[in-house]
Amino acid sequence: MKGLVYHGPGKRSWDEVPDPTIEAPTDIVVRIDTSTICGTDLHILKGDVPACRPGTILGHEATATVVEKGSAVTTLEIGDRVLVSCITSCGRCRFCKEARYGQCIGGGGWIFGHLIDGLQAEYARVPFADTSVYKIPAQLDDEEVLFLSDILPTAYEVGVLNGRVEPADTVAIVGAGPIGLAAVLTAGLYTPAHIVAIDFDDGRLARAREFGADVTINNRDGRALAEVMELTGGLGADVAIEAVGLPETFELCTELVRPGGRIANVGVHGHSATLHLETLWIKDVTITTGLVDTRTIPQLLSLIEGGRLDPTVLATHHFSMDQAMEAYEVFGNAAKSHALKVVLEGTGVANKRNTKVEVTASA
Ligand SMILES: NC(=O)c1ccc[n+]([C@@H]2O[C@H](COP(=O)([O-])OP(=O)(O)OC[C@H]3O[C@@H](n4cnc5c(N)ncnc54)[C@H](O)[C@@H]3O)[C@@H](O)[C@H]2O)c1
Ligand SMILES: [Zn+2]
Ligand SMILES: [Zn+2]
């Protein structure tokens, strides 16, 4: 089969690789029907994630069809359409039992396209299948659920839920990339009084407005703090969600927030940021951090089924899976291409709605 292989910093190619096989009785092998590229894949390609060894197939988001199953898999059948979570759960360790799947110490956690071969490929091996994939409701298209692998639960769990967004809150979201925009979509579920999106990119701010932000601020001129204070009568935002991953955007969040407010950090940080305790100690603020657990996938699926949430608005470009190299160019050049999420479509037919398809095993 073919897959998008990481060959060390700056190097990737679409290679012929061995077909995945069942290695443990709890594994399944899937045919990938749709996949997508994450900002984290670009971090890996920059060399920021040394644990990802050259030779690894990238990608941690997919919808797929089961083509083979191990002898211990009890809840899935060949031909089932499944959403593969970016987080694998062993289902048995202390953290999995607390639904903190991201912290799994039983062999799961974020492993796809990181510690094991990922999902930007024709086929993939999925460990701990019973506890790590979700059956796709028959009436939903693959593209309607694809972004539940990672960015929707990330923005929702690590941003909106950690930030304890409540009705009538003013929620300031710093960063209007796919994660920040997914935070705009899911913060809206709580009917805040204001959703403020802050970025440098006017195109992305325009999307934030389409998705439910009522105030957008281009912070190139450093106006964000003053504008949020003006909007809130000098108090500050109830919740500040950091969705960039830079010291200055984290520090901006700590300035934007009101006394008693919550700062929810979502961004992946490569450098230390300064925590200004000399001004914060008196403000009763809560700061949270986190890796996504994807424990809210069932809830988000219900919202999509009920017509309350439509993640397809995040898809800006479509490619066939074998155009993955080109898709990386487009995604990596978002300033020019205006890409948010690119959808990679497998050659199978299961990316069409409601089909329990006949499939042949990959091996
Ligand atoms: N915690 C988790 O589990 C988790 C999971 C996935 C992604 N992430 C992280 O979330 C962050 C956002 O992801 P994304 O895919 O949306 O990234 P992205 O790079 O597409 O978006 C970041 C946005 O921030 C804007 N920006 C950059 N500098 C800015 C500044 N100084 N002020 C205001 N805006 C600025 C950019 O214009 C861009 O629109 C990344 O750090 C990513 O690694 C975290
Ligand atoms: Zn990701
Ligand atoms: Zn576990």
Image (tube, grey):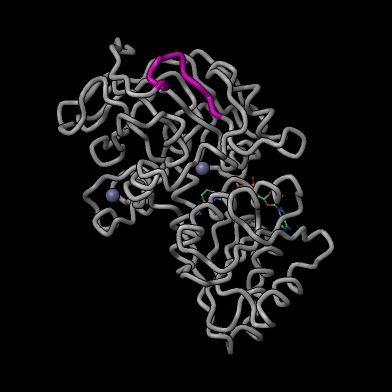
Q: Is residue 165 above or below residue 83?
A: below
Residue that lies at the very extreme toward the right in this rendered image: 221
Residue 43 percent coordinates (x, y): 61, 42
Report the residue at 42% width, 36% height from top.
145
Residue 335 percent coordinates (x, y): 75, 39
Residue 355 percent coordinates (x, y): 32, 19
Residue 14 percent coordinates (x, y): 57, 18
Q: Which quarter of the image is occupied by the N terminus?
A: top left
Report the residue at 68% width, 29% height from top.
330
Residue that lies at the very extreme toward the front in this rendered image: 307
Q: Is 8 placed left or right of 305 in the picture?
A: right
Q: Which quarter of the image is occupied by the C terminus?
A: top left
Residue 289 is a magenta residue: no
Which of the 4 quarters of the picture holds residue 258? bottom right
Q: Which residues are magenta?
A: 343-352
Could you say which is closer to the camera, residue 249 or residue 230?
A: 230
